[in-house]
Amino acid sequence: QVQLVESGGGLVQAGGSLRLSCAASGRTRYWPMGWFRQPPGKERDFVAAISGNGGSTMYTDSVKGRFTISRDNAKNTVYLQMNNLKPDETAVYFCATDRTPLGAARRTQASYDYWGQGTQVTVSS
């Protein structure tokens, strides 16, 4: 059974940093992973994704240069380092995985088969 558990969220001031973690269990090693976020009252949107072997990443334009997605396949964990956070990035952040071994990074939600419960990130101004 596949489970994804996010951690690392919290309250941070604008300009600050957080590192989110997504620990996966089950046969998820080398599956593509993605991070999405849902601000209050809004739809869930793509943030970043990483391929199954970690060799390819993609980001939504607004986070390029500030966020970094990475993975440690030995630990079956994906990370999202978030720097210079902005108040409008307050959201619940979700990780997701696509059950395609060594698959490509993807930005569409429909590509992902399993989702975590999310972790709250609040950025104060």
Image (tube, rainbow, N blue to C red):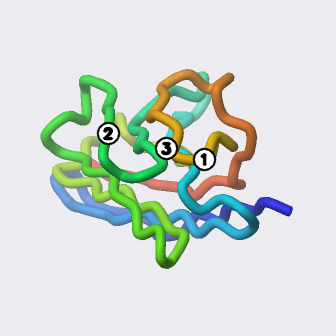
Q: Earlier in the sequence, mark 2 or mark 3?
A: 3
Q: Is residue 105 left or right of residue 116?
A: left
Helix, strand or loop status at disc 2:
strand
Where on the picture, by quarter, is residue 27?
bottom right
Residue kind at label 2, given as amino acid type: Thr
Q: Kindly identify which residue carries mark 3.
A: 35
From the top left corner, tell me how far across and down residue 2 is, in percent.
78, 60
Q: Which residue is mark 1?
A: 101
Quick one: label 1 or label 3, which is nearer the N terminus? 3
Q: Amino acid at mark 1?
A: Pro
| Residues at marks 1 and 2, CA–CA distance in whole angstroms | 16 Å
- Is residue 12 depicted above or below 125 in this figure? below
Q: Residue at x 50, y 77 (%)?
A: 75
Q: Nearer the viewer, mark 1 or mark 2?
A: 1
Q: Amino acid at mark 3?
A: Trp
Residue behind mark 2: 57
Which one is nearer the viewer's eye here, 26 or 14? 26
Name which quarter of the figure residue 17 lies in.
Answer: bottom left
Q: Residue furthest front?
A: 102
